[in-house]
Image (spheres, grey):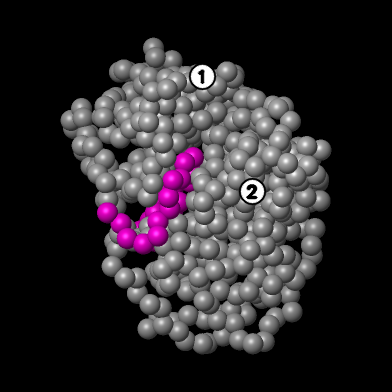
Amino acid sequence: MVLHFVLTAWTVSIVSVLGQVQSREDALLCAAEPWGRYSASGGLYTASGVQYIYSFGGDTRSHGDERGGVVSTNWRFRLGGNGTKCWERVADSPAAVGYRSTATALNDHVYLFGGGDTSFAATGHFWRYSLLGDSWEEMLPSQVVGPWPSARYKHATVKISETRMLLLGGRRDATVLSDAWLFDLDQMAWSLVGDSILQVYRHGMAYDPLRQVVWIHGGLDGNRQRYGTQLWRWNISTFDSSHLELAELVPTTGPGPSRLASHAAEYIPELDALLFWGGTCSDDAQLYLYDIARSAWCAVYAGNRPDRRDAMIWALDYPRFYVAQGDLICHNFGIYPIVDVHVFDFAAPWAGWQMLYEPRNERGTGAEAYCDGTNRGSCQPQPLLAERGTRISQPAGCESGFMDSISTWANTSTTTTVADEVSSTSSPALSRASANAGRAAVVSAWVLSATAPLSQ
Protein backbone atom coordinates (compact mmCIF):
# COMPACT_ATOMS: atom_id res chain seq x y z
CA MET A 1 0.00 0.00 0.00
CA VAL A 2 1.18 3.49 -0.84
CA LEU A 3 -0.23 6.50 0.97
CA HIS A 4 -1.81 9.15 -1.20
CA PHE A 5 -3.80 12.22 -0.31
CA VAL A 6 -6.92 13.41 -2.08
CA LEU A 7 -9.20 16.36 -1.65
CA THR A 8 -12.24 15.88 0.51
CA ALA A 9 -15.64 17.14 -0.58
CA TRP A 10 -14.98 20.53 0.90
CA THR A 11 -12.89 23.01 -1.05
CA VAL A 12 -10.82 26.00 -0.14
CA SER A 13 -12.05 29.35 -1.40
CA ILE A 14 -9.09 30.49 -3.42
CA VAL A 15 -8.73 31.92 -6.90
CA SER A 16 -8.02 29.61 -9.80
CA VAL A 17 -6.16 30.69 -12.90
CA LEU A 18 -6.53 27.34 -14.65
CA GLY A 19 -2.84 27.14 -15.28
CA GLN A 20 -2.19 30.66 -16.54
CA VAL A 21 0.24 32.50 -14.30
CA GLN A 22 0.97 35.49 -16.49
CA SER A 23 -1.47 36.98 -18.98
CA ARG A 24 -0.89 38.83 -22.21
CA GLU A 25 -1.74 42.01 -20.31
CA ASP A 26 1.11 41.22 -17.90
CA ALA A 27 3.41 40.70 -20.87
CA LEU A 28 2.64 44.24 -22.04
CA LEU A 29 4.58 45.45 -19.00
CA CYS A 30 7.75 43.90 -20.40
CA ALA A 31 10.18 46.12 -22.28
CA ALA A 32 10.61 43.81 -25.26
CA GLU A 33 9.53 40.53 -26.79
CA PRO A 34 11.12 38.43 -29.52
CA TRP A 35 9.20 37.41 -32.58
CA GLY A 36 7.93 33.88 -32.33
CA ARG A 37 10.62 31.45 -33.45
CA TYR A 38 11.35 27.79 -33.81
CA SER A 39 14.49 25.66 -34.17
CA ALA A 40 16.42 28.02 -31.91
CA SER A 41 19.18 26.64 -29.68
CA GLY A 42 19.29 27.18 -25.97
CA GLY A 43 18.38 25.85 -22.57
CA LEU A 44 18.42 26.62 -18.87
CA TYR A 45 21.62 28.36 -17.79
CA THR A 46 22.67 30.40 -14.77
CA ALA A 47 24.29 33.81 -15.09
CA SER A 48 25.42 35.71 -11.99
CA GLY A 49 23.36 33.44 -9.76
CA VAL A 50 20.09 33.90 -11.72
CA GLN A 51 18.43 31.22 -13.83
CA TYR A 52 17.33 32.03 -17.37
CA ILE A 53 15.99 30.17 -20.36
CA TYR A 54 18.29 31.25 -23.20
CA SER A 55 17.22 31.30 -26.85
CA PHE A 56 19.84 31.66 -29.58
CA GLY A 57 18.78 32.45 -33.15
CA GLY A 58 16.13 30.32 -34.82
CA ASP A 59 13.69 30.88 -37.65
CA THR A 60 10.95 33.53 -37.35
CA ARG A 61 9.27 32.73 -40.66
CA SER A 62 5.57 31.90 -40.75
CA HIS A 63 3.69 30.37 -43.66
CA GLY A 64 0.83 32.66 -42.77
CA ASP A 65 2.51 35.89 -43.81
CA GLU A 66 5.88 34.81 -45.24
CA ARG A 67 7.67 37.35 -43.07
CA GLY A 68 10.79 36.63 -41.07
CA GLY A 69 13.59 34.13 -41.57
CA VAL A 70 16.72 32.84 -39.84
CA VAL A 71 17.96 35.44 -37.36
CA SER A 72 21.02 36.23 -35.23
CA THR A 73 19.06 37.86 -32.40
CA ASN A 74 19.25 36.23 -29.00
CA TRP A 75 17.12 36.37 -25.88
CA ARG A 76 16.74 35.05 -22.37
CA PHE A 77 13.70 34.60 -20.12
CA ARG A 78 14.27 35.29 -16.44
CA LEU A 79 12.98 32.60 -14.09
CA GLY A 80 14.26 33.87 -10.74
CA GLY A 81 12.51 36.39 -8.49
CA ASN A 82 8.89 37.43 -8.16
CA GLY A 83 6.75 39.64 -10.33
CA THR A 84 6.28 39.90 -14.07
CA LYS A 85 8.43 37.51 -16.07
CA CYS A 86 9.91 38.98 -19.22
CA TRP A 87 12.08 38.17 -22.20
CA GLU A 88 15.34 40.14 -22.20
CA ARG A 89 17.55 40.89 -25.21
CA VAL A 90 21.14 39.67 -25.04
CA ALA A 91 24.05 40.26 -27.43
CA ASP A 92 23.43 39.51 -31.10
CA SER A 93 25.63 36.78 -32.53
CA PRO A 94 27.97 37.64 -35.42
CA ALA A 95 26.11 35.14 -37.60
CA ALA A 96 22.95 33.06 -37.41
CA VAL A 97 24.52 30.52 -35.03
CA GLY A 98 21.41 29.11 -33.39
CA TYR A 99 19.24 27.78 -36.21
CA ARG A 100 18.96 23.97 -35.84
CA SER A 101 22.27 24.01 -34.00
CA THR A 102 23.01 22.68 -30.51
CA ALA A 103 23.75 24.51 -27.28
CA THR A 104 25.67 22.87 -24.43
CA ALA A 105 26.97 24.67 -21.33
CA LEU A 106 30.51 23.81 -20.22
CA ASN A 107 31.69 25.82 -17.24
CA ASP A 108 30.63 29.45 -17.82
CA HIS A 109 30.21 29.25 -21.59
CA VAL A 110 27.64 27.81 -23.98
CA TYR A 111 29.12 25.97 -26.96
CA LEU A 112 27.20 25.78 -30.25
CA PHE A 113 28.26 23.67 -33.21
CA GLY A 114 26.89 23.61 -36.74
CA GLY A 115 23.36 24.67 -37.59
CA GLY A 116 21.96 26.42 -40.62
CA ASP A 117 22.84 29.80 -42.07
CA THR A 118 20.42 32.41 -43.35
CA SER A 119 20.04 30.38 -46.57
CA PHE A 120 19.12 27.28 -44.52
CA ALA A 121 22.39 25.56 -45.50
CA ALA A 122 24.25 23.40 -42.98
CA THR A 123 27.44 24.85 -41.51
CA GLY A 124 30.44 23.56 -39.57
CA HIS A 125 30.92 26.68 -37.48
CA PHE A 126 31.78 26.39 -33.79
CA TRP A 127 30.85 29.24 -31.44
CA ARG A 128 30.92 29.89 -27.74
CA TYR A 129 28.87 32.39 -25.79
CA SER A 130 30.00 33.81 -22.44
CA LEU A 131 27.21 33.72 -19.88
CA LEU A 132 29.06 36.21 -17.69
CA GLY A 133 30.36 38.54 -20.42
CA ASP A 134 27.35 38.33 -22.78
CA SER A 135 29.75 38.04 -25.71
CA TRP A 136 30.43 35.75 -28.66
CA GLU A 137 33.62 34.12 -29.95
CA GLU A 138 34.06 31.87 -32.96
CA MET A 139 36.21 28.82 -32.31
CA LEU A 140 38.45 28.22 -35.32
CA PRO A 141 40.12 24.96 -36.41
CA SER A 142 43.48 26.57 -35.64
CA GLN A 143 42.42 26.92 -31.99
CA VAL A 144 41.20 23.35 -31.59
CA VAL A 145 43.27 20.16 -31.68
CA GLY A 146 42.30 17.19 -33.86
CA PRO A 147 39.92 16.70 -36.78
CA TRP A 148 36.83 18.83 -37.27
CA PRO A 149 33.24 17.53 -37.53
CA SER A 150 31.67 18.00 -40.94
CA ALA A 151 28.97 20.60 -41.54
CA ARG A 152 25.52 19.60 -40.28
CA TYR A 153 22.30 20.68 -38.67
CA LYS A 154 19.41 18.98 -36.84
CA HIS A 155 21.94 16.96 -34.82
CA ALA A 156 22.03 16.53 -31.04
CA THR A 157 24.57 16.95 -28.26
CA VAL A 158 24.68 15.90 -24.61
CA LYS A 159 26.85 17.11 -21.77
CA ILE A 160 28.71 14.21 -20.14
CA SER A 161 30.83 16.26 -17.73
CA GLU A 162 31.61 19.90 -16.96
CA THR A 163 34.24 19.84 -19.70
CA ARG A 164 33.01 17.32 -22.28
CA MET A 165 30.10 17.09 -24.70
CA LEU A 166 29.11 14.41 -27.17
CA LEU A 167 27.63 15.04 -30.63
CA LEU A 168 25.71 12.53 -32.77
CA GLY A 169 24.15 12.50 -36.23
CA GLY A 170 22.49 15.32 -38.07
CA ARG A 171 21.90 16.11 -41.70
CA ARG A 172 23.78 17.86 -44.49
CA ASP A 173 21.78 18.44 -47.68
CA ALA A 174 20.20 15.05 -48.44
CA THR A 175 22.77 13.07 -46.42
CA VAL A 176 21.82 11.77 -42.98
CA LEU A 177 24.91 11.36 -40.79
CA SER A 178 25.73 8.60 -38.29
CA ASP A 179 29.05 9.72 -36.83
CA ALA A 180 29.75 10.78 -33.24
CA TRP A 181 32.21 13.35 -31.93
CA LEU A 182 33.58 14.23 -28.50
CA PHE A 183 34.60 17.78 -27.61
CA ASP A 184 37.00 17.99 -24.65
CA LEU A 185 37.33 21.50 -23.24
CA ASP A 186 40.38 20.63 -21.12
CA GLN A 187 42.25 19.44 -24.20
CA MET A 188 40.52 21.96 -26.46
CA ALA A 189 40.07 19.12 -28.92
CA TRP A 190 37.52 17.38 -31.12
CA SER A 191 37.85 13.62 -31.62
CA LEU A 192 35.87 11.17 -33.73
CA VAL A 193 34.56 8.43 -31.41
CA GLY A 194 32.30 6.56 -33.81
CA ASP A 195 31.65 6.74 -37.53
CA SER A 196 28.56 4.54 -37.74
CA ILE A 197 26.70 4.77 -34.43
CA LEU A 198 23.17 5.45 -35.70
CA GLN A 199 21.91 7.22 -38.80
CA VAL A 200 19.56 9.81 -37.37
CA TYR A 201 18.63 13.49 -37.22
CA ARG A 202 16.04 15.58 -35.35
CA HIS A 203 16.36 12.97 -32.59
CA GLY A 204 16.11 13.22 -28.82
CA MET A 205 19.21 12.35 -26.80
CA ALA A 206 19.87 12.21 -23.04
CA TYR A 207 22.90 11.18 -20.97
CA ASP A 208 22.45 8.70 -18.12
CA PRO A 209 25.49 9.00 -15.79
CA LEU A 210 24.30 6.12 -13.60
CA ARG A 211 24.80 3.62 -16.41
CA GLN A 212 27.17 5.73 -18.53
CA VAL A 213 24.92 5.40 -21.54
CA VAL A 214 23.28 7.82 -23.95
CA TRP A 215 19.59 7.19 -24.67
CA ILE A 216 18.37 8.04 -28.18
CA HIS A 217 14.77 8.26 -29.28
CA GLY A 218 12.80 9.44 -32.30
CA GLY A 219 14.05 11.51 -35.17
CA LEU A 220 14.35 10.53 -38.82
CA ASP A 221 16.37 7.77 -40.46
CA GLY A 222 18.66 7.60 -43.49
CA ASN A 223 15.66 7.63 -45.82
CA ARG A 224 14.38 10.76 -44.05
CA GLN A 225 11.44 8.83 -42.60
CA ARG A 226 10.39 9.12 -38.96
CA TYR A 227 11.36 6.37 -36.58
CA GLY A 228 8.52 4.81 -34.60
CA THR A 229 8.66 3.83 -30.94
CA GLN A 230 12.29 2.68 -31.06
CA LEU A 231 14.54 3.50 -28.12
CA TRP A 232 18.30 3.03 -28.37
CA ARG A 233 20.94 2.68 -25.68
CA TRP A 234 24.48 3.74 -26.55
CA ASN A 235 27.21 2.64 -24.16
CA ILE A 236 29.90 5.32 -23.78
CA SER A 237 31.59 3.92 -20.66
CA THR A 238 34.96 4.09 -22.38
CA PHE A 239 36.54 6.35 -24.95
CA ASP A 240 39.73 4.29 -25.07
CA SER A 241 39.12 3.10 -28.61
CA SER A 242 38.58 5.31 -31.61
CA HIS A 243 35.27 3.61 -32.35
CA LEU A 244 32.57 3.02 -29.76
CA GLU A 245 30.02 0.24 -30.04
CA LEU A 246 26.87 0.87 -32.05
CA ALA A 247 23.65 2.03 -30.44
CA GLU A 248 21.60 -0.94 -29.20
CA LEU A 249 17.85 -1.18 -29.75
CA VAL A 250 16.07 -1.64 -26.41
CA PRO A 251 12.85 -3.69 -26.11
CA THR A 252 10.17 -1.79 -24.17
CA THR A 253 6.61 -2.34 -22.98
CA GLY A 254 3.61 -0.05 -22.78
CA PRO A 255 2.25 2.70 -25.05
CA GLY A 256 5.42 4.64 -25.79
CA PRO A 257 5.76 7.79 -27.89
CA SER A 258 5.73 7.28 -31.63
CA ARG A 259 7.24 9.20 -34.54
CA LEU A 260 8.63 12.09 -32.49
CA ALA A 261 11.05 14.56 -34.06
CA SER A 262 12.61 17.80 -32.82
CA HIS A 263 11.28 16.95 -29.37
CA ALA A 264 12.45 17.34 -25.77
CA ALA A 265 14.50 14.54 -24.20
CA GLU A 266 15.93 14.46 -20.68
CA TYR A 267 17.22 11.99 -18.10
CA ILE A 268 15.82 12.61 -14.61
CA PRO A 269 18.24 11.23 -11.97
CA GLU A 270 15.74 11.71 -9.15
CA LEU A 271 13.30 9.34 -10.87
CA ASP A 272 15.83 7.25 -12.80
CA ALA A 273 13.61 7.83 -15.79
CA LEU A 274 13.63 9.40 -19.23
CA LEU A 275 11.34 12.27 -20.15
CA PHE A 276 10.09 13.05 -23.67
CA TRP A 277 7.69 15.78 -24.78
CA GLY A 278 6.50 17.33 -28.04
CA GLY A 279 7.52 16.61 -31.60
CA THR A 280 4.30 15.19 -33.04
CA CYS A 281 0.69 15.93 -33.90
CA SER A 282 -0.32 12.38 -32.98
CA ASP A 283 -0.59 12.73 -29.22
CA ASP A 284 -2.36 14.97 -26.72
CA ALA A 285 0.72 16.86 -25.49
CA GLN A 286 1.25 14.30 -22.74
CA LEU A 287 4.52 13.79 -20.91
CA TYR A 288 6.14 10.44 -21.67
CA LEU A 289 8.18 8.87 -18.88
CA TYR A 290 10.29 5.78 -19.46
CA ASP A 291 10.95 3.72 -16.34
CA ILE A 292 14.47 2.46 -17.04
CA ALA A 293 14.51 -0.26 -14.37
CA ARG A 294 11.21 -1.70 -15.61
CA SER A 295 11.79 -0.92 -19.28
CA ALA A 296 8.25 0.42 -19.46
CA TRP A 297 6.51 3.57 -20.68
CA CYS A 298 4.14 5.86 -18.85
CA ALA A 299 2.04 8.55 -20.56
CA VAL A 300 1.09 11.35 -18.16
CA TYR A 301 -1.77 13.69 -19.10
CA ALA A 302 -1.37 16.66 -16.78
CA GLY A 303 -4.04 19.37 -16.85
CA ASN A 304 -3.77 22.54 -18.95
CA ARG A 305 -1.35 21.07 -21.45
CA PRO A 306 0.34 23.55 -23.83
CA ASP A 307 -0.37 23.34 -27.53
CA ARG A 308 1.46 20.57 -29.38
CA ARG A 309 4.66 21.69 -31.08
CA ASP A 310 8.16 20.77 -32.18
CA ALA A 311 11.53 22.52 -32.51
CA MET A 312 11.06 24.28 -29.17
CA ILE A 313 13.47 25.05 -26.36
CA TRP A 314 13.13 23.04 -23.19
CA ALA A 315 14.82 22.93 -19.82
CA LEU A 316 14.80 20.57 -16.85
CA ASP A 317 15.44 21.83 -13.33
CA TYR A 318 13.78 19.00 -11.45
CA PRO A 319 11.08 19.04 -10.25
CA ARG A 320 10.33 21.71 -12.86
CA PHE A 321 10.23 21.09 -16.60
CA TYR A 322 10.00 24.11 -18.93
CA VAL A 323 9.09 24.46 -22.61
CA ALA A 324 9.28 27.67 -24.63
CA GLN A 325 8.86 28.85 -28.21
CA GLY A 326 8.70 26.32 -31.05
CA ASP A 327 6.55 25.66 -34.09
CA LEU A 328 2.84 24.96 -33.62
CA ILE A 329 3.03 22.25 -36.26
CA CYS A 330 -0.46 20.92 -35.71
CA HIS A 331 -2.38 24.01 -36.86
CA ASN A 332 -3.08 23.57 -40.57
CA PHE A 333 0.26 21.75 -40.83
CA GLY A 334 2.11 24.92 -41.70
CA ILE A 335 4.86 26.79 -39.91
CA TYR A 336 3.63 28.90 -37.03
CA PRO A 337 6.36 30.11 -34.63
CA ILE A 338 5.45 31.10 -31.09
CA VAL A 339 7.20 32.64 -28.08
CA ASP A 340 5.25 31.47 -25.01
CA VAL A 341 6.75 29.82 -21.89
CA HIS A 342 5.21 26.98 -19.83
CA VAL A 343 6.24 24.96 -16.78
CA PHE A 344 5.21 21.62 -15.25
CA ASP A 345 6.11 20.92 -11.61
CA PHE A 346 6.51 17.24 -10.72
CA ALA A 347 6.30 18.22 -7.04
CA ALA A 348 2.78 19.62 -7.60
CA PRO A 349 1.34 17.59 -10.48
CA TRP A 350 -2.20 18.46 -9.43
CA ALA A 351 -1.46 22.04 -10.55
CA GLY A 352 -1.00 20.89 -14.13
CA TRP A 353 0.94 22.99 -16.62
CA GLN A 354 1.29 26.71 -15.97
CA MET A 355 1.84 29.43 -18.52
CA LEU A 356 4.63 31.75 -17.44
CA TYR A 357 4.41 34.02 -20.46
CA GLU A 358 1.71 34.67 -23.05
CA PRO A 359 2.91 36.47 -26.20
CA ARG A 360 1.82 40.07 -26.61
CA ASN A 361 2.48 40.70 -30.31
CA GLU A 362 0.02 39.87 -33.07
CA ARG A 363 1.77 36.66 -34.09
CA GLY A 364 0.66 34.41 -31.29
CA THR A 365 -2.74 35.71 -30.24
CA GLY A 366 -4.94 34.04 -32.86
CA ALA A 367 -6.04 37.49 -34.10
CA GLU A 368 -3.85 37.61 -37.20
CA ALA A 369 -5.43 38.96 -40.36
CA TYR A 370 -4.61 35.77 -42.25
CA CYS A 371 -6.32 33.60 -39.62
CA ASP A 372 -9.44 33.14 -41.75
CA GLY A 373 -10.29 29.50 -41.08
CA THR A 374 -8.76 28.20 -44.32
CA ASN A 375 -5.64 26.13 -44.77
CA ARG A 376 -3.81 28.99 -46.45
CA GLY A 377 -2.57 30.36 -43.16
CA SER A 378 -1.25 28.86 -39.97
CA CYS A 379 -3.69 30.39 -37.54
CA GLN A 380 -4.18 29.17 -34.01
CA PRO A 381 -7.76 27.98 -33.38
CA GLN A 382 -7.51 27.57 -29.61
CA PRO A 383 -5.90 29.29 -26.60
CA LEU A 384 -2.17 28.92 -26.21
CA LEU A 385 -2.83 27.04 -22.99
CA ALA A 386 -5.72 24.71 -23.74
CA GLU A 387 -7.93 24.10 -20.70
CA ARG A 388 -7.84 20.32 -20.84
CA GLY A 389 -8.23 18.41 -17.62
CA THR A 390 -6.15 15.62 -16.19
CA ARG A 391 -6.73 12.16 -17.62
CA ILE A 392 -5.66 8.79 -16.31
CA SER A 393 -2.20 7.87 -17.50
CA GLN A 394 -1.47 4.82 -19.61
CA PRO A 395 -1.29 2.14 -18.38
CA ALA A 396 -3.31 2.86 -15.23
CA GLY A 397 -1.06 3.36 -12.24
CA CYS A 398 2.12 3.72 -14.28
CA GLU A 399 2.93 6.99 -12.58
CA SER A 400 3.69 5.06 -9.38
CA GLY A 401 7.22 5.87 -8.32
CA PHE A 402 7.25 9.09 -10.33
CA MET A 403 4.62 11.19 -8.54
CA ASP A 404 1.33 10.93 -6.69
CA SER A 405 -1.31 8.83 -8.36
CA ILE A 406 -3.18 10.87 -10.94
CA SER A 407 -6.42 9.92 -9.21
CA THR A 408 -5.32 12.10 -6.29
CA TRP A 409 -4.61 15.22 -8.33
CA ALA A 410 -6.83 18.14 -7.40
CA ASN A 411 -9.30 19.59 -9.87
CA THR A 412 -7.69 22.75 -11.20
CA SER A 413 -11.02 24.55 -11.08
CA THR A 414 -11.00 24.44 -7.29
CA THR A 415 -7.35 24.97 -6.44
CA THR A 416 -4.78 27.57 -7.31
CA THR A 417 -2.17 26.52 -9.82
CA VAL A 418 0.37 29.18 -8.99
CA ALA A 419 3.72 27.93 -7.78
CA ASP A 420 5.28 29.90 -4.92
CA GLU A 421 8.08 31.36 -6.97
CA VAL A 422 6.08 32.32 -10.08
CA SER A 423 3.13 34.20 -8.57
CA SER A 424 1.86 37.11 -10.66
CA THR A 425 2.03 40.67 -9.37
CA SER A 426 -1.00 41.59 -11.46
CA SER A 427 -3.27 39.37 -9.34
CA PRO A 428 -2.81 40.03 -5.61
CA ALA A 429 -5.07 37.09 -4.78
CA LEU A 430 -2.55 34.76 -6.41
CA SER A 431 -0.06 35.27 -3.64
CA ARG A 432 2.37 32.90 -2.02
CA ALA A 433 -0.14 32.39 0.77
CA SER A 434 -2.76 31.28 -1.76
CA ALA A 435 -0.40 28.77 -3.29
CA ASN A 436 0.47 27.38 0.12
CA ALA A 437 -3.20 27.21 1.03
CA GLY A 438 -3.87 25.12 -2.06
CA ARG A 439 -1.15 22.68 -1.11
CA ALA A 440 -2.38 22.56 2.45
CA ALA A 441 -5.83 21.60 1.23
CA VAL A 442 -4.36 18.55 -0.47
CA VAL A 443 -2.15 17.54 2.42
CA SER A 444 -4.94 17.90 4.99
CA ALA A 445 -6.95 15.08 3.43
CA TRP A 446 -6.22 11.56 4.61
CA VAL A 447 -7.88 9.15 2.22
CA LEU A 448 -5.76 6.08 1.58
CA SER A 449 -5.45 4.39 -1.78
CA ALA A 450 -3.34 1.64 -3.30
CA THR A 451 -1.35 2.23 -6.43
CA ALA A 452 -1.29 -0.71 -8.83
CA PRO A 453 2.21 -1.84 -9.79
CA LEU A 454 3.19 -1.50 -13.42
CA SER A 455 2.98 -4.80 -15.24
CA GLN A 456 6.24 -6.13 -16.60
**What quarter of the picture does the C terminus occupy?**
bottom left
C-beta proximity under 8 Å, tags 1 and 2: no
**What quarter of the picture does the N terminus occupy?**
bottom left
Q: Which mark is residue 111?
A: none
Residue drawn at the location 69% of the way across and 72% of the way down: 413
Q: Nearer the viewer, residue 367 or 99?
A: 367
Residue drawn at the location 52% of the way across and 81% of the way down: 5
Q: Nearer the viewer, mark 1 or mark 2?
A: 1
Percent of width and height locating residue 11: 68, 82
Q: Residues within 10 Å of mark 1 (few under 14, many from 20)?
A: few
Q: Which mark is residue 341?
A: 2
Query: Image quarter for residue 184?
Result: top left
Asked if 121 appears above or below 269 in the picture, the reply is above
Q: CA distance from mark 1 to mark 2?
A: 29 Å
Of all residues, the one furthest to the top in this rendering is 142
The residue range painted magenta reads 251-276
Query: Which residue has dot 1 on it?
Result: 121
Query: Image quarter for residue 56?
Result: top right
Q: Do we see residue 25 in this rendering?
A: yes
How many marks on residues?
A: 2
Residue drawn at the location 54% of the way across and 48% of the way down: 281
Q: Secondary structure beneath disc 2? A: strand
Q: Residues within 10 Å of mark 2 (few under 14, many from 20)?
A: many
